[in-house]
Image (cartoon, rainbow, N blue to C red):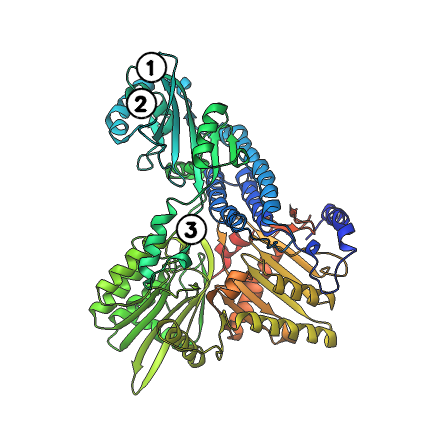
Amino acid sequence: MATAHSARKRAAAVQRIAPAIRTIHPKLDAPELYLNPHVSLLAFQKRVLEEARDITTPLLERVKFLSILASNIDEFFMVRVAGLWQQIENRSMETNIDGRSPGEQLELIRQEVTSLTTEMYRVWREELAPELRVAGINILETGELNPQQITYVDDYFRREVYPVLTPLAVDQGRPFPHISNLSLNIGAVVSNGDGQEHFARVKVPGTLPQLLPLPSEAGELNFVWLEQAIIGNLRLLFPDMDIVKADVFHVTRDAELAIQELETEDLLESVQEAVWRRRFRDAVRLQIDAEMPQRLIDILTSNLELDQNDVYRVHGPVDLSRLKALLSIDKPALKDKPFIATVPRGFAGPRSEIFTTIQEGDVLMHQPFESFQPVVDFLRAAAKDPDVLAIKMTLYRVGRNSPIVEALLEAIQNEKQVAVLVELKARFDEESNIEWAQKLEAEGVHVVYGLPNVKVHCKMAMVVRREGNAIRRYLHLGTGNYNPVTGRIYTDLGLFTCNDEIGADVSDLFNHLTGYSAKKSYRKLLVAPHTIRTGLERLIRREMERHEKHGDGHLIFKMNALEDSGMIRLLYEASQVGVKIDLIIRGVCALRPGIPGVSETISVRSIIGRFLEHSRIFWFANGGEEQIYAGSADLMPRNLNRRVEVLFPVETPRLIKRLRERILEKYLEDDVCARVMHPDGTFERLTPVANRKPLNSQLWFLKHDA
């Protein structure tokens, strides 16, 4: 519940944008009504930073959030900033949803990232590092090492590090080396005493521990960064040379795959070539030690073809994503308490009972509070069951050592028909997916590599089973990937069903993905790029009509991102007729809530906590005859227009009630993890109401969601 202070902040936010709002176009397409999506995503990163500062969170979990933030900023540059540079290079005059050109957006991003990075490193230096020291975890500078530790580091360097390093000099005969994406490097300036200085690059190997454990007193854990151990021993790499200066730098490159540019008819070959080319795409950011001299910066920027505005100085260890190494420390008191995920009734017994359980009624799973294991067991049961004829599924992000893939391979060994669509274009998982696709194909699985012009992002598995004289289709439809690792840390929904109409839809969709089909309509499912947009528009307009007649229109949408201008305009229209709209959005939100006459019935909140919010749920009050869809799609142009996505209906009354009362309403009652959004795009963390027990929705699910 918002406090009086919150109301004042909201009013102030409206006042700040009021001059622009007075000139709103009646068609609701004025740029002033929309927030810049890139800046909105950086606002999400600020909320992640808040988690690193939250003293109620265990210390090593706070360190984890700082590591995640650093990694998120890397990806932001690799994808979003790189995309803006591509627009500039292509001389695109297209403006974003808020009316800004690519150049204007880059300037705004630089300001926001500089501020965010400065604060991130302040939190590390002034809050987390000191608190770690109090807890007996010390990350030492080389000047702080005692003689025993210095000897240990030097010995470790000679034994483990030195053989791996390759110093690369830069001169007339040796050109500036390629600096790979996200690599950590040391730029060394050396001299042989004749007054001339020479530049060399040493790559910090990512295959070695980034934090070297040191001999420590009882009760303490001491570490030193790997690059400091290397810098302290550079004399061994450059014998008889003077080490004039040595500084650390980190390069971020454009990581978008330009598959459409490759002239080949083989999608697998296209993706393999695109992944290889990615290593050589343009640099978009140079992160450096704050003490790096300008002459060294000039060498790097000129060779990397970067502007001085693309250089980000940091006061602390370059690339804080490496702090994740601290999470392996065995100090349970500094971490979240472990939990045991529950298993839905009917899935805890022998695998042979799984199909009977699904026959008895749809089963909705809420991960990670409920275990991902039933999904694996579902496929393993199908692999062993003599009555199962075929298995079909989509794979987007599989991960390493996948039990899902092992179940599919077992099914092939048991002579089932197995067809799998492996999306090779899943960003940053391309190489892993290529390996899995080739392994599956080698074992006899029918593998489709995705479609040329769209990504297949939907999550669905179908088991075809003979039962007497009939054929029955058993389905799992989800909001998240078939990945047991993310199944323990992402909040997602999964529906087991053997509904005939949904089964027929899934069959039709698989036929579209694996064969030739012009089908664009389905019985129960909403499927992008054809029917999710039109289907949601129809349901929203129905709610508007209902509200105009009865005054009880209500929408609750939960998603990761809201960026599509058409959907935002429709939500504005719904608000203008009075429909109550509650939006639960983890990350990007280009909609401005709470604007009088435009969006005053819309509220936006973001939940940031122990688990990454990932489920997408679309709830329509429909005059008491509630209708709910869940699935893989956010309301972004790419999801609605350029991906194969699925939203599936949840139709069982008890499951609808569970989704509304035990999931959506708990998110809306959260006053611990929730932040509310103001019209100017800023977020405010809620303050628990007096005389009411604070509610952390994720912790509530851990205790109650079964």
| Separation of marks 1 and 2 at Cα, in angstroms | 26 Å
Mark 2 crowd level (few <14, some 14–19, many ≥20, 10 Å Cα)? many
Instruction: Give the structural element (helix, strand or loop) at label 3.
Output: loop
Residue sitting nearer the eye, 667 or 344: 667
Disc ID at residue 153: 2
The image position of residue 321, as x and y in percent, is 44, 39
Circle 3 Cα neighbour tier, 10 Å, few/some/many (<14 / 14–19 / ≥20): few
Q: Is residue 181 left or right of residue 81?
A: left
User: Which amino acid, by three-letter code, is at mark 1?
Assistant: Asn
Residue labelled with disc 1:
192
Instruction: Label 1, secondary structure: give it.
Output: loop
- Left or right side of 98 for 253: left
Residue at which label 3 appears: 339
Q: On screen, 227 above or below 576? A: above
Of callouts 1 and 2, the N-terminal one: 2
Disc 2 on helix, strand or loop?
A: helix
Q: CA distance from mark 2 to mark 3?
A: 38 Å
Residue drawn at the location 75% of the way across and 64% of the way down: 26
Estimate the spatial distance between the alpha carbons at disc 3 and disc 1, rounded to whole Å: 60 Å
Kindly indicate whether the residue at mark 1 contacts the one at mark 3 (C-beta within 8 angstroms). no
Q: Are marks 2 and 3 in contact (CB under 8 Å)?
A: no
- Residue 475: give x, y in percent of width and height: 39, 72
Q: Residues within 10 Å of mark 1 (few under 14, many from 20)?
A: some
Which dot, 2 or 3, sits closer to the camera?
A: 2
